[in-house]
Amino acid sequence: SAEATLVGYMPGQQKGTPWYIQSAKCGGPELDRQLRTADDAKLESKWWTGTVSKTSAEVAKAVGRAPPATAESAALLDSVIDCVVVHACTGLDNTPADFLVGGLPSVKAGSLYDRMNRDETRARTWPLSYWRDFPQRKLYL
């Protein structure tokens, strides 16, 4: 069926579907506070202010844009990585060469595409890593 091609698409609860397939099942003021704490730490981290800022500035230059505000770096990386994959992998010839090797995204360690991919992924998983890697941090429970 057409629905089978949509990753994660679930029109409603279905018997036998694991709870974690349904999105946005967790929430509330406690989770919001935990996420804000982790996000604040991310924005102040050396990784974010150094590595991510540098990567996002290089990516912005490659696509002819001004570097984003520091807090918006992950949004730029997320948008550009999606466009690079779709455009390059479908054969469109308008993908900046800075991201490519042989017409496809360069996954070679250290390439701009690789750094963009790693930084975007780490930005998404930051809250989990922030709390998991430092169990001595006080959770607000």
Image (cartoon, grey):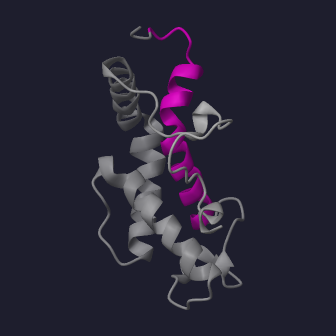
Which x, y percent locates residue 23?
A: 49, 40
Q: Residue furthest bottom?
A: 93
- For the residue pair 28 and 49, the one nearer the viewer reads as 28
Residue at image coords 50%, 35%: 126
- Relative image position of residue 119 (x, y in whole percent): 53, 50
Would residue 36 appear left or right of 120 to someone viewing this image? Answer: left
Q: Nearer the viewer, residue 8 or 123?
A: 8
Which secondary structure dominates the residues rendered in magenta?
A: helix
Q: Find residue 64 and report its horizontal and vertical position in percent.
A: 36, 78
Which residue is depicted at the point 47% across and 11% down? 137
Residue 113: quarter of image: bottom right
Seen in the picture, residue 82 relative to 38 is either above or below; the reply is below
Task: From the viewer's side, name the closer residue of 108 and 8.
Answer: 8
Q: Answer above or below: position of 127 versus 10.
A: above
Return the residue nearer the eye: 107 or 6.
6
The residue at 46%/59% (across/down) is 78
Magenta-highlighted residues = 112-138
Q: Residue at x 31, y 46 (%)?
A: 71
Q: Is residue 42 above or below residue 103?
A: above
Asked if residue 114 lies in the magenta stretch, the reply is yes
The answer to if 131 sits in the magenta stretch is: yes
Using the rendered view, name the quadrant where residue 44 is placed. top left
Question: Which quadrant holds the N terminus?
Answer: bottom right
Count of marks, rendered view: 0
Give the quadrant of the C terminus.
top left
